Amino acid sequence: MDKRDSVKRRLNFISGEDFYFLTYELLLLTDILTAANGMFRDHRKLAYLVQLAGDENVVRILERYEDRTISNPEDRERLFVTFANGELNKREIFKLVFALERRGLLRVERAAIPEVVDVQLNRSVLPADFLKNEVFGADRARIGRIKKVVPRLSTLNMDTFLQKVYESRGVNVWAL
């Protein structure tokens, strides 16, 4: 491939709009954040987690400001952007969850809240070592680091999730 084509492809790539990226991140998140047969409660959190896990700098911000308000306005803005992008991608994530259910990769159960579903990864239908591919080692590592900073991500309710990830760091958010 020509060098200019390579640069052009990188410029055209927007991870939030790439359904292959979103699919793989969803599969990785449900794999890493749940036990072998565990459910990921409230699919809406996945829209934010995809944004968080896709950006090394944001993971560093979460680690750096684990127990305190973010003092740097640029860091606060960067974390807020993950919230805003998560809000924008909620609908796509919802559709993608059901598309993956139709293909048998996920199992979906209705939650107590209307229009909210709980998700379980159907590990038995995935090829061996599919999610362990070394190409996505950095993604797996970032998700693991997020899990250490915010434990029990798969079981937190939406309000608690937003409080622990955003509000406790001084980022004003609202859930739609």
Image: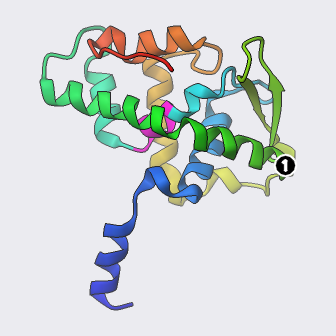
- Residue drawn at 63 percent across, 21 percent down: 154
The one nearer the camera, 60 or 5, is: 5
Residue 31 visible in image = yes
- Residue drawn at 56 percent across, 26 percent down: 45
Give the image location of residue 169, x and y in percent: 29, 13
Left or right: 45 as drawn, with respect to 100: left
**Is residue 17 within the magenta segment?**
no
Q: Residues within 10 Å of mark 1 (few under 14, many from 20)?
A: few
Residue named by callout 1: 102
Residue 142 visible in image = no
**Is residue 51 within the magenta segment?**
yes
Q: Magenta-highlighted stretch: main secondary structure?
A: helix
The one nearer the camera, 94 or 27, is: 94
Q: Which residues are magenta?
A: 48-54
Which of the 4 image quarters holds residue 156? top right
Disc 1 residue type (three-letter): Arg
The one nearer the camera, 87 or 8, is: 87
Give the image location of residue 129, x and y in percent: 71, 54
Q: Is residue 93 above or below residue 112?
A: below
Give the image location of residue 10, x and y in percent: 34, 69
- Residue drawn at 42 percent across, 16 percent down: 174
Q: How many marks?
A: 1
